[in-house]
Image (spheres, rainbow, N blue to C red):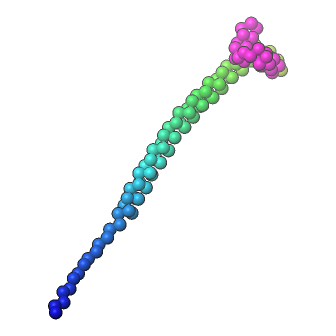
Amino acid sequence: MAVNDVNIRIRAQDDTKDAFGSVTKSLGGLRSAIFSIQGAIGGLIGGVVIKDTIALADAYTSVTARLRLVSASTQEFTSVQKALFDSAQNTRSSFEQTVNLYSTLR
């Protein structure tokens, strides 16, 4: 009886590691893109807020300068400013417009 030797080689390859690596890399790219978009939107909103804040500060500086020009003293300035603010609130009008009218009439 002849003995035959049979050699069988089994080679298994696990591709799941590469597949999960690819998915993880894609999700990382998506996450990065989302953060970039979020940063851009935040920058736009921040820019608008800064622009509005600067405009408000400029308007207040202008109003204060107009009141100082028509006020004889700091005490008069303070009392007129309070009275004009109250008047603007009561009439639901702009404080800036109220001061402009007052300084024009004065």
Quarter of the image for residue 6 reads: bottom left
Q: In the image as oriented, which residue stretches furthest toward the front?
A: 1
- At a point 28% along the width and 74% down the height, the residue shown is 10
Residue 49 vs 2, above or below: the answer is above
Q: Position of residue 27 (x, y in %)?
A: 44, 51
| Quarter that holds the N terminus | bottom left
Q: Is residue 79 magenta?
A: yes
Residue nearer the viewer, 4 or 78:
4
Q: In the image as oriented, which residue stretches furthest toward the left?
A: 2
Looking at the rendering, the stretch of residues picked out in magenta corresponds to: 78-106
Residue 66 in view: no
Residue 96 in view: yes
Q: In the image as oriented, which residue stretches furthest toward the top?
A: 105
Quarter of the image for residue 102 reads: top right
- At a point 57% along the width and 34% down the height, the residue shown is 46
Q: Position of residue 2 (x, y in %)?
A: 16, 91
Q: Left or right of 82: which side holds 58?
A: left
Q: Is residue 48 magenta?
A: no
Q: Position of residue 93 (x, y in %)?
A: 72, 15
Residue nearer the viewer, 53 or 21:
21
- At a point 53% along the width and 33% down the height, the residue shown is 44
Residue nearer the viewer, 10 or 24:
10
Quarter of the image for residue 7 reads: bottom left
